[in-house]
Image (tube, grey):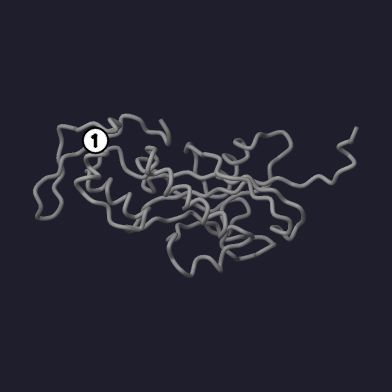
Amino acid sequence: MNRQEDYPNPAVTVDLVIFTIAEDTLQVLLIRRGAEPFLGQWALPGGFVEIEESLDEAAARELREEVGVTQIYLEQLYTFGEPGRDPRGRVISVAYFALIDADRQRIHSASDAADAAWHPVFDPGLGPRLAFDHQRILEYAVWRLRNKIEWTTVGYELLPAKFTLSELQRVYEIILQRPVDKRNFRKRILAQGLIRELNESRSVGAHRPARLYSFLKRRLDE
């Protein structure tokens, strides 16, 4: 029988892809590394899993320690384990992703992060600046998000408690990076039965007041 001590033990990390919508674009939360390797480069928040904690506990701890964000839903995204992805040695990373309304969280750098800030996901200059294989992780997270938005309530996490249908439609357009037909979109969203119409309206510019809605379920999946 093969023994555990006969095999080298790789380290395990968690990396966190946190999305929000701000300034009319999809943004990702990044930290500027305050230690080697990749000192001074932007990276996804994350770190090593401690012996006595679960993966979920490690993800929540790293999010709290590095950027001061707490009490958000984190979903496992994928496991990245290519040899050579980390210059410190054999490291396997379990990536998580989440969506938040940026107005509800006040981020700040902590722990070994020199800085923390939101960055536009579709900025063509973002990729080369990311440490490790974090550009690949980010691209996979965007692909997963675009797939999930078509069949889950994932986009609702990016909006405040009360919103208009136009605001919800804009979330979809920003994530998909293409226009969405207004009539078909509203028909499909209302047919899902996951939002309710409120007896409230909001005026936007010179347009007539728009009806407000709220979510029946604030979660990523039914």
Q: Looking at the picture, which amino acid does disc 1 mark?
A: Leu
Q: Quadrant of residue 161?
A: top left
Which one is nearer the viewer's eye here, 43 or 147?
Answer: 147
- Dot 1: what SS? helix
Residue at 59% x, 65% y is: 41
Q: Which residue is mark 1?
A: 190
Graded by Cα atoms within 10 Å as few (under 14), some (14 to 19) or many (20 or more), the crowding at tag 1 reads few
The correct choice, above or below, for 149 with respect to 179 in the image is: above
Q: Is residue 75 left or right of residue 209?
A: right
Point out residue 66 in the picture as x, y percentages from the top left corner: 57, 49
Which one is nearer the viewer's eye here, 194 or 102?
Answer: 194
The correct choice, above or below, for 120 with respect to 183 in the image is: below
Point out residue 144 in the picture as x, y percentages from the top left corner: 48, 47
Residue at 63% x, 54% y is: 112
The correct choice, above or below, for 221 with respect to 147 in the image is: above
Point out residue 107 in the picture as x, y percentages from the top left corner: 47, 50
Quarter of the rendering occupied by the C terminus: top left
Which one is nearer the viewer's eye here, 153 or 35?
Answer: 153
Q: Is residue 206 left or right of residue 90?
A: left
Q: Residue reaching furthest front?
A: 184
Number of marks present in the image shown:
1
Residue at 62% x, 59% y is: 133
Q: Is residue 156 left or right of residue 3?
A: left
Quarter of the rendering occupied by the N terminus: top right
Point out residue 78 in the picture as x, y percentages from the top left corner: 59, 45
